Amino acid sequence: MDSSPGVPSTASRRSRKRDTAADSAPAAPTAPLSAGGGLVPERLRDLFTELDEALTAWGEVEVAPLRHYIAYRRLVNIASVIFRPKHEAILLYLRLDPGTVALEEGFTRDMRGIGHLGTGDLEVRLPSAADLEKAAPLIRRAFEAA
């Protein structure tokens, strides 16, 4: 045996690491994603469907569901979508210079120098379809700039 009494073997340490990683993994969302193979939280499904249509309306767009977010890209990533079901909102990160946007508290945020998942320096918080309509010009600008 390669371990002494009271000291776990290498194999048992590895399995514990895997168990801990599995326990800390985020809970799986509950509804299918319409534009790829991933999943969307049930309470955000309708809003995401509208957002997905808005993000793919500007021509050829590749939708890449990744582990923590969904990327929308042409030659480069244009937008990233992250779900926040506890806050009943979708976070949209756009590849736009926040200095060219009139930032609005609770709606848009400058993410330059702040670590976050996804690509883009402008965060747009979308808790409702009305906010998605308000974000439409920003989405269009991001696609035109790409």
Image (cartoon, rainbow, N blue to C red):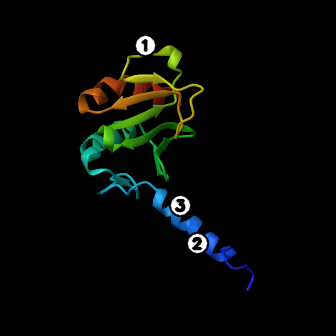
The amino acid marked with disc number 2 is: Ser
CB under 8 Å between discs 3 and 2 = no
Residue 102, disc:
1
The amino acid marked with disc number 3 is: Ala
Q: Is residue 100 left or right of residue 9?
A: left
CB under 8 Å between discs 1 and 3 = no
Q: Position of residue 1 (x, y in %)?
A: 73, 86
Q: Nearer the viewer, residue 38 or 110?
A: 110
The amino acid marked with disc number 1 is: Ala
Is 65 placed above or below 20 here?
A: above
Q: Nearer the viewer, residue 14 or 93?
A: 14
Residue 130 occupies quadrant: top left
Disc 3 to disc 2, how far (Cα)? 10 Å
Residue 15, disc:
2
SS under mark 3: helix
What residue lies at 49% left-to-right and 53% top-to-bottom?
A: 67
Crowding at mark 2 (Cα within 10 Å: few <14, some 14-19, many 20+): few
Q: Of label 1 and label 3, which has the lower sequence position?
A: 3
Q: Is residue 16 left or right of residue 29?
A: right
Residue farthest toward the front in the current orientation of the protein: 5
Is 65 placed above or below 23 here?
A: above
SS under mark 2: helix
Residue 21, disc:
3
Disc 1 to disc 3, how far (Cα)? 41 Å
The answer, for residue 83, to whether it is visible in the render is yes
Disc 1 to disc 2, how far (Cα)? 50 Å
Q: Position of residue 137 (x, y in %)?
A: 37, 23
Q: Of label 3 and label 2, which has the lower sequence position?
A: 2
Q: Nearer the viewer, residue 137 or 104?
A: 104
Crowding at mark 3 (Cα within 10 Å: few <14, some 14-19, many 20+): few
SS under mark 1: loop
